[in-house]
Amino acid sequence: MSRIKFKSFSSGSCGNCYFIGIFPEEGHRCEAGVLIDAGVSPRRIKKEMQSDGLCFDDFSAVLVTHDHMDHIRSLGSFCKHISKPVWATEVLHRALCRHSMTRYQINDYRMELRPSAWNDVVPGRISARYFVVPHDATETVGYAILLDSYKFVIMTDIGRMTDEALNWARQADTVVIESNYDPEMLRLGPYPPDLQKRIRNGHGHLSNPECAEAIRAFNHEGLQHIFLCHLSEHNNTPDLAYKESLPYAGSASLAPLPRQTASPLITLAY
């Protein structure tokens, strides 16, 4: 039996990066793993991984959700110094090849995701399938990730829920979902009206009530863990996000992810 472990290095507008991997029942060495997004520096990732007994060889690829800076800020450095394949959609790869942070580094590591299909990102162990979500980037995707037989779904920066996103979440063992803002904090907060409109217009971010409603819609008997991601520093608190979604979590564990610091290395399944 394998164990599945998850870690968030940062989850918010200052940077986003997550690790998911397969570990043996006995021992600590990762057998197969991937990073999702690269908005945190390789140096910091290395330090955080070492603190958990991990190393850069414990992930074999990077999956990209979209081309906003807080998700790709360090992607060029990852390509240059770590030489791991970067998986993204055709649309996203075209954008990354033009982006100032990635255009000179990414070509040699470009791996294109096939649409409507499982992609073998770590051969024989980890497969990923993307689904498009509404957000004001060039293209934004969520991922369903299959680690052996364990189903992990992540949807960060999602302006509103879609039927496809809900369908994948209804099949998952673990779901990572955005719970970005409290509507009243946003209304009364420091953001100007145009920015407030951008956040809540259906192509920005998911509010706490919208996240809670999504959890109510996708919760199912097999769901084990729910993590709330990308909480706003100015328009939300972990306590507000947690309390909004808790009534709908059922028997699944529920936890907000830290905005600027790393989470522990969390064992999702034995």
Image: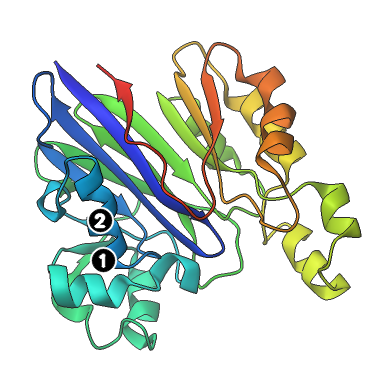
Visible residue check, residue 62: no
Kind of element beneath mark 2: helix
Left or right: 133 in relation to 1: right
Q: Is residue 235 above or below residue 73?
A: above
**Quadrant location of residue 154?**
top left
Quadrant (top left, top right, bottom left, bottom right) of the N terminus: top left
How far, Cα to Cα, is label 1 from label 2? 6 Å
**Quadrant location of residue 198?**
bottom right
Give me the disc on residue 43: 1
Identified at 84% across, 52% down, the residue is 185
**Contact check, label 1 and label 2, Cβ < 8 Å:** yes
Q: Which residue is mark 2?
A: 47
Instruction: Give amino acid for label 1.
Output: Arg
Kind of element beneath mark 1: helix
Quadrant (top left, top right, bottom left, bottom right) of the C terminus: top left
Left or right: 164 in relation to 30: right
Q: How many marks?
A: 2
Q: Position of residue 41 (x, y in %)?
A: 33, 68
Left or right: 191 in relation to 168: right
